[in-house]
Image: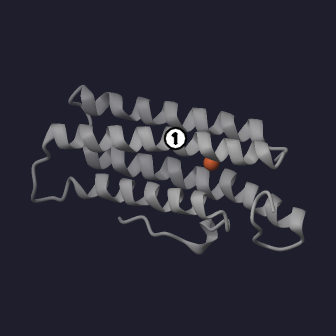
Amino acid sequence: MTLRWSEAFLSNNSTLDEEHAELFRLLNRLESLEPPDRNVDPEEFQRNVEELLEYTTQHCSREEQVMSSVRYPGHEAHAVDHTALRASLIVLLQPVHAGRGTISIFSKEARSLFLRHFQKEDLAYLRWVGEQSGQPRAEPGA
Ligand SMILES: [Fe+2]
């Protein structure tokens, strides 16, 4: 299943929005590596996973900087969730690397982790930003 970008994820912070869209693209590309009629090149999978992990780390760091700069009260809890998300991705990779799991299972579970984070933690932040400005969607820091 392809992850679809949703307006619900728009923050009006163009950097974060572009990064969220890029995360969706990386997740979809990872999932597309294992169509039913194709064997997966392990090196291609590894390259894609490393790119996803690195981009996730960079994005989480930038998002935390934005939250800190606007004094978001949930900033620390959000950072904890980012750490848990990255740790969960590493745990999900273990069976794949051990030859006991499939890429499609990893992709599906990774997608669920990101969606849970977007829908709970990121949207809570966006709601808070909206409340601060009296508008449903406001530029963080504005
Ligand atoms: Fe986040």
- Residue at the (82%, 58%) spot, across then down: 128
Estimate the x, y position of residue 70 in percent, counting from the top left: 81, 49
* Label 1 Cα neighbours within 10 Å, binned few <14 / some 14-19 / many ≥20: few
Would residue 42 be found to the left or right of residue 110 on screen? left
Q: Is mark 1 within 8 Å of ligand 1?
A: no
- Residue at the (52%, 58%) spot, across then down: 20
Colouring style:
one colour
Name the kind of residue labelled 1 in the image: Gln
Would residue 119 be found to the left or right of residue 101 on screen? right
- Residue at the (89%, 62%) spot, across then down: 132
Give 26 or 92, whichever is nearer the viewer: 26
Would residue 25 be found to the left or right of residue 57 on screen? left
Residue 140 visible, this orientation: yes
Q: Quadrant of the C terminus?
A: bottom right
Estimate the x, y position of residue 37 in percent, counting from the top left: 9, 59
Give 77 or 54, whichever is nearer the viewer: 54
